[in-house]
Amino acid sequence: MYCPSCRAEFREGFFRCEDCDRTLVETLPAEPAPPQFVHLATIFTEGEIALVKASFDQAGIDYYFHGEQAHRLAPLPLGARLMVRREYAAEAETILKEAGQL
Ligand SMILES: [Zn+2]
């Protein structure tokens, strides 16, 4: 049995964590997963977004633009946050540098 609050393990026969005043559970919920996507760059123009999309699609990089839809009309005052799947981040960064986006 485990306390869902402090995650302490209890022996059989315990039903409550006295420290946290919580009812023990059979299994702990999974730890929150680390973010799968990392923020690589913020891009402000439709043209640059199109360029990044073309480069990343060609390289097979898993990415998305956060905030692009909210600012569909150019210019993009807050920019679109380019989010890249963690395992592609290094490769994506190289592509951006070569394209002059970083
Ligand atoms: Zn506890």
Image (spheres, grey):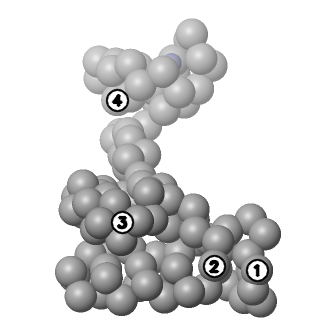
Report the quarter where the C terminus lies: bottom left
Point out the tag, 1 or 4, that comes first from the N-terminus.
4
Disc 1, SS: loop
Three-letter amino acid code at the position of disc 2:
Thr
- Labels 1, 4: front one: 1
The spot of residue 38 in percent (x, y) is 42, 55
What distance separates the C-alpha of mark 2 from that of mark 3? Answer: 15 Å
Q: Are marks 2 and 1 in contact (CB under 8 Å)?
A: yes
What distance separates the C-alpha of mark 1 from that of mark 4? Answer: 55 Å
Q: Are marks 1 and 4 in contact (CB under 8 Å)?
A: no
Per the rendering, the mark at residue 96 is 3
Per the rendering, the mark at residue 45 is 2
Q: Which residue is mark 4?
A: 1
- Labels 4, 3: front one: 3
Which residue is at 56% across, 11% downward? 18
In the displayed structure, would residue 101 be above or below residue 27? below
Which residue is at 41% across, 79% downward? 52
Identify the residue at the far top of this view: 19
